[in-house]
Image (tube, coloured by chain):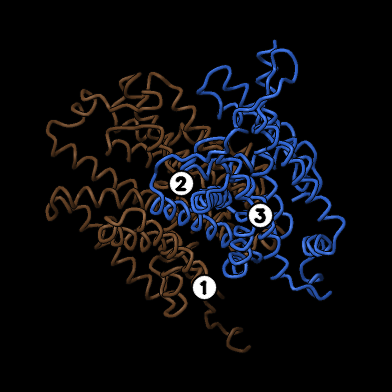
Amino acid sequence: MSRVEHASRSSRVGVALAGFGLAALAMAPLWADRATLRLLAEMFTYVALASLWNLLAGYAGLVSVGQQAFVGLGGYLLFALGIQFGVPPLAAVLVAGPVAALVSIPVALLIFRLRGAYFAIGTWVMAEVFRLMASQIAALGGGSGISLPASLVLAMAPTRQWRELEIYWLALALAVAVLVAIFVLLRSRHGLALTAVRDNELAAQSSGIDVRRLKFAVYVLTAFGTAMIGALIFLMKLRISPDTAFSVNDWTAFVIFIVVIGGIGRIEGPIIGTIVFFLLRQTLADLGSLYLMMMGTVAIAVMLAAPKGIWGLIVERLGWQMLPLQRRLVLEPSGKARAR
Amino acid sequence: MTEWLNVVVQGVLTGGLYAMFAVGLSLIFGVMRLVNIAHGDLIVLAAYVSLMVTQALGVDPLTSLVLVVPIMALVGYALQRGLLNFTLGEDLLPPLLVTFGLSVIIQNGLLELFTADSRKLQAGAIEVLTAQLMPGVWVGYLPLVQFAVAILVIAALQVLFYKTALGRAFRATSDDQPVAQLMGLNTRHVFALAMALSLAVVAIAGVFLAVRSNFDPAIGPARLIFGFEAVIIGGLGNMWGTLAGGVILGVAQAIGAELDPGWQLLAGHIAFLVILALRPQGLFPKVSG
């Protein structure tokens, strides 16, 4: 008899460490000051965005440089629902997901006609179309943008401190939800199919996987998550404009940098990448455009020298896995098996 | 009526510029299946190189092409041999991400060197000369020259591709890289020549862009998108189709701008999406994939 085992010793340690880390982060308001909490919340949004992009590009092979379309869409949904219909911001963050998933279906039908690298630029055109349309909506401030009305913000919580805590925990909860959702997806039958597509699309297809349908589903799911994170990001900023909402630098270039550095096609990669990205940013951001040039150079160097990123190197050298995702066939010694 | 005719004529002439953005992109995709995300930023780089040449030598922008074209071709050759050749393979992620990184580097490098100020190249008297096409329809000399140059560039590329040994090498590498290599072609060199040629066209496009309108370090990505749209509208692999794609894009933008200035870019994107929806292989396709 044989069975499939997921866990290894390193993954048991990894899960325990993740549990401790999560508990510490959930209790962060006890040990961290306001600025640290803000920074952590921003990091959570980048972990989530990067994990979603990693699912899209690293597993499904859909390299998008236009995910800012859904970040911006989520942000604008938060403002539109709040200003036009008085929807409370926290509810609007949750509503943004399903609405964006609906929007992403016709978008996917169109851009899935483009193959490979041209798909990437097609996603960018879509993000541009979204940006130009947003700047045409006078009720949401047109090209110059708009602030979230104070009445909506004040109604969120009795004090400013509580409001900030609410946003912090929401950011943590959403990031964990995105990671758990991706983990569950990868552990499922579809995850096995997705990993097969990652490793060899042609072989996956000839094993009976409906690659196109799988990619379509991943695209829509990613839009769902990305828009919720987008709404959260602009709830933290309290102001939105077409240029910030649909920024290719903030929501795509940085995210790609994070995933490439951390390790593409691995669930742990975006977490490692986000930590590295924020360490660099906290120390070097004063350099401005020089800092961005360095970032581009590092990303190119990693892509050429270690295309699997930091986590890829760790896996290669030490065979660690933080989360029990690997599938190993364990042959159990029964009479027949021993005889062979 | 003549007002609209005017709009269409201006759109057609702008389309020539978009076609020049596009053929460089289409050429390297044809030869090595590489989509260069930094293409638009290289166009802007060419504009700045021309700015430096005109300032240093006091020549007018069109004369500066004598230097800008070989400089950009060299940049292209070096870029391909020194960097992009290492990214080519089965996986499409490395070339995409490396050219994306390159785009970030070029944009911020230009920002560091030239600030975010908007620039324009002065071409002198030719900028204000106009000819009357018919009563009420006037066209500038410069847009006419630019359109004529676009046609010349495409015709020259066509001849190069189908009548010369280099063109044969390009087509052979495009059809089957391993076999081309077995036949004694150094594909690394062939790829680098294709990139050099692509950036020579980029140089011409960049100089005309800089003479026609203001430019700053951040406008590259939009040029990439215009070029890409022209390629897809026209159909992959067909250079004259790409010219048609550029013209359609230019006319759509001109009509959009006439309706409402805010609609200029949106109208172009919508024309692209409509064609993608109705005829995803483009209007005049030649090769698939």
At horizontal 34% and vertical 19% (from top left) the residue drawn is A85
Q: Which residue, as the protein is rendered here, is positioned at the far right?
A: B163
| Mark 2 and mark 1 residues within 8 Å of each other at the beta carbon | no
Residue A63 in sight:
no
Disc 2 with disc 1 on a shared chain: no
At horizontal 52% and vertical 55% (from top left) the residue drawn is B100
Residue type at tag 3: Ala
Where the N terminus of chain B falls, by quadrant? top right
Q: Is residue B87 left or right of residue A247?
A: right
The residue labelled by disc 2 is: B217
Of B132 and A88, the residue lying toward us? B132
Which chain is tinted brown? A
Of A69 and A162, the residue lying toward us? A69
Residue type at tag 1: Arg
Residue type at tag 2: Pro
The residue labelled by disc 1 is: A328
How far across and down, in percent of the image, does residue A88 sit? Answer: 28, 27
Q: Is residue A163 left or right of residue B100?
A: left
Q: Colour of chain B?
A: blue
How far across and down, in percent of the image, does residue B20 sit? Answer: 67, 43
B164 to A65, vertically: above or below: below
At horizontal 61% and vertical 39% (from top left) the residue drawn is B226
Q: Chain of mark 3?
A: B
How far across and down, in percent of the image, does residue B285 sit? Answer: 79, 42
Q: Earlier in the sequence, mark 3 or mark 2?
A: 3
The residue labelled by disc 3 is: B200
